[in-house]
Amino acid sequence: MEKTALLLAAAALLAVGCQCKQEPTATTAETVMANILQRKSVRSYTADTIPSQVMENLLRAAMAAPSGRNLQPWSFIVLTDKSRYDSIFAGNFNLPMFKASAAIVVVCADTMAMMSPRDNRDAAPSLQPNYLWRDDMGAVTENLLLAAEAHGLGACWTACYPYPDRMEPVRNSLEIPATVVPYCVVPIGYPAGDNQPKDKWDPNRIHYNRW
Ligand SMILES: Cc1cc2nc3c(=O)[nH]c(=O)nc-3n(C[C@H](O)[C@H](O)[C@H](O)COP(=O)(O)O)c2cc1C
């Protein structure tokens, strides 16, 4: 009898534990999935401006990205002064798209970081090349795009790195330090016209347990 009572008590405790556990609800999953699947490059915008709180949300989402050794090598330059765009984007950029956008976020990467060498983590930190910055910047940029989509905004990831003709005018005009790379440029605005996501689902790209 005592054993049965103990088992029942353990089962009750487990049941309570299950109720407390924060499982993602189907609604949350559906919302997040819909946002990811709805994201698309948007290159036409209305004249509406972006509220500063919304822009802060986008940058908050961007900065939540993962990064190698958690070095968070990113910085952002938010541009709204279109009178400067001709010189900043004197390289081979889509200037009409940029001028139509409400704001442009220049996503920058610090290629150096204070850290100990990988093979001797006990060594005193010193300024070292961060070889993972490119990977980190992809994550941060995608977060920015997804947050834009979530706020009903349209955005377009526009390469800056590795093209010298794009990077140099941006670097010089915005006084970006030598160890910092203007990685990409993201025009953002409320979408105009018909913008549809592409269906990229391809089960043939998936391999199970071996190639
Ligand atoms: C690394 C990278 C660089 C890109 N550079 C440009 C660019 O210079 N100009 C542009 O119009 N779009 C650029 N794009 C956007 C792609 O053209 C776009 O993501 C692709 O066509 C897929 O369309 P989707 O974003 O609507 O899914 C870039 C995207 C990535 C990831």
Image (cartoon, helix red, strand yellow):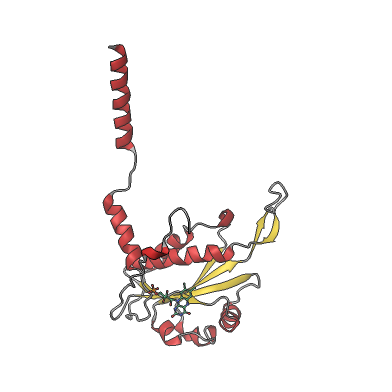
Residue at coordinates 38% horizontally, 75% vertically from top-left?
A: 41
Residue 1 falls left or right of residue 120: left
Is residue 164 visible in this depiction of the protein? yes
**In the depicted view, which residue is nearer to us: 10 or 187?**
10
Give the residue drawn at x 53%, y 83%: 88
Ligand 1 position by quadrant:
bottom left
Q: Is residue 54 visible?
A: no
**Who's the residue at 34% across and 71% down the image?**
153
Among all residues in the image, which is located at the extreme front? Answer: 210
In this view, the residue farthest toward the top is 1
Q: Quadrant of the N terminus?
A: top left
118 or 94: nearer the viewer? 118
Q: Residue 179: which quarter of the image?
A: bottom right
The residue nearer to you, when weighing 24 against 104, is 24
Q: Is residue 85 above or below residue 5?
A: below
Above-or-below relation of 170 to 6: below
Count the marks: 0
Which picture quadrant has residue 175? Answer: bottom right
Query: Where residue 96 appears, x then y in whole percent?
Result: 42, 87
Q: Position of residue 95 (x, y in %)?
A: 45, 86
Task: Judge left or right: residue 151 versus residue 137.
Answer: left
Query: Can you give x and y, in whole percent of width and height, for residue 126 in the image?
Result: 71, 56
Q: Position of residue 98 (x, y in %)?
A: 43, 82
> In the figure, 150 relative to 173: above or below?
above
Q: Residue furthest right?
A: 123
